Image: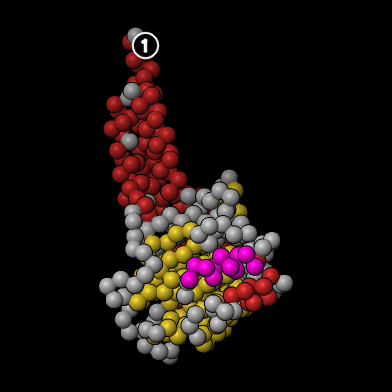
Amino acid sequence: MRWEGAVRRRRGRVIAGFAVVTAGLLLFHRAVPGSAGSLLESFLPWLGPVVVVLLGLALLRRSGVALVALVLPAAAWAYACGGLLLPGEGTGPENGAYGLVVVQHNVSDENPDPAGTARALAGTGADLLALEELVPPALSVYEKSLASAYPHHAVHGTVGLWSRHPLTGVRPVDLKPRGITGPWDRGLRAVARTPRGDVAVYVAHLPSVRVRASGLASSRRDESAGRLGDAVAAEEVGAVILLGDLNGTVDDRGLDPLTSRMDVAGRGLALSFPAAFPVARIDQVMARSATVGRIRTLPATGSDHLPVLARVTLGRDLGGET
């Protein structure tokens, strides 16, 4: 019996050790260097299930030490990620604030049903639709199917913006990383002339990343994020909305050039990729001089991404384009 008790205590200490490490990763993930840290940050909310597994083991082993230690990662997860699970505001105006409902969707260049995807997006009633991986002949299908609900649109390369409000100042945004020699048009800027004032809208599709044993291979994504961050910083219109497939989560340090300058959704997990079993939100809505409300996913389309929808609350007087 003493031998069994000693084994139980040792196992309890092992579980407690894992609990402390998990808490450390949640609170000090920025201390993990390089691409390994970027990989950890991409899947930070998934440390929550790790805590649940450790709890189950602690209960199975009837270890008081482990149960006490698990308070640390539980509290750390609640601090780092728990806010995403809290209820947020709806998509309509509240307290006199003016908001734009926006949808971001990588429609996939292999989408077998672009017409159905367009109908689903139009049915959201959003003010702005940002789409990526627009390729012929699907592009013409989107233009035709969305024309009645969205009389204003702009397309550059494989990204596009559809709007209920007039668009001006349309221009490409150069996000092309070094080493790519062929055409690479994945950035677009336009000004939406809303009833409250002008809003600069950016649509972007950053380079893909690869998951390796050593972490994320993301140098091109990070370089493009830096270029996009510089463009936003130089934007003269005060209010800015960024919509795009950024191939990174808001916790990923690779998107620091954007998240350090812009507001992100504090409510809603909205895991968007891959559509069959979403594990991360790499489709993002960010804003400057505006607030991004709760973000949520929409039903699957023919894409390998899920659409995401959010309401962006604007200031009372945005002014005009400069």
The magenta stretch is 115-125
Q: Does residue 67 appear anywhere in the picture?
A: yes
Q: Which residue is mark 1?
A: 3
Residue at 43% across, 54% down: 269
The amino acid type found where label 1 is placed reads Trp
Residue nearest the observer in this picture, 147 or 86: 147
Figure quadrant of the N terminus:
top left
Instruction: Tell me how many marks there are.
Output: 1
Q: Does residue 226 appear anywhere in the picture?
A: no
Residue nearest the observer in this picture, 56 or 296: 296
Quarter of the rendering containing residue 143: bottom right
Taking the image as shown, residue 181 lies to the left or right of residue 15, namely right
At label 1, counting other C-alpha atoms closer than 10 Å, the crowd grade (few under 14, some 14-19, many 20 or more) is: few
- Residue 188 in picture, x, y percent from top left: 56, 77
Q: Give above or below for 205 relative to 144.
A: above
Taking the image as shown, residue 120 lies to the left or right of residue 26, namely right
Residue at 58% across, 50% down: 276
Residue at 34% across, 63% down: 89
**Secondary structure mainly formed by the magenta segment:** helix
- Residue 80 in picture, x, y percent from top left: 35, 51
Indicate whether residue 149 is drawn in magenta: no
- Residue 37 in picture, x, y percent from top left: 47, 51
Q: How is the image coloured?
A: secondary structure
Indicate whether residue 118 is drawn in magenta: yes
Residue nearest the observer in this picture, 300 or 76: 300
Figure quadrant of the C terminus:
bottom left
Q: Assign a secondary structure to mark 1.
A: helix
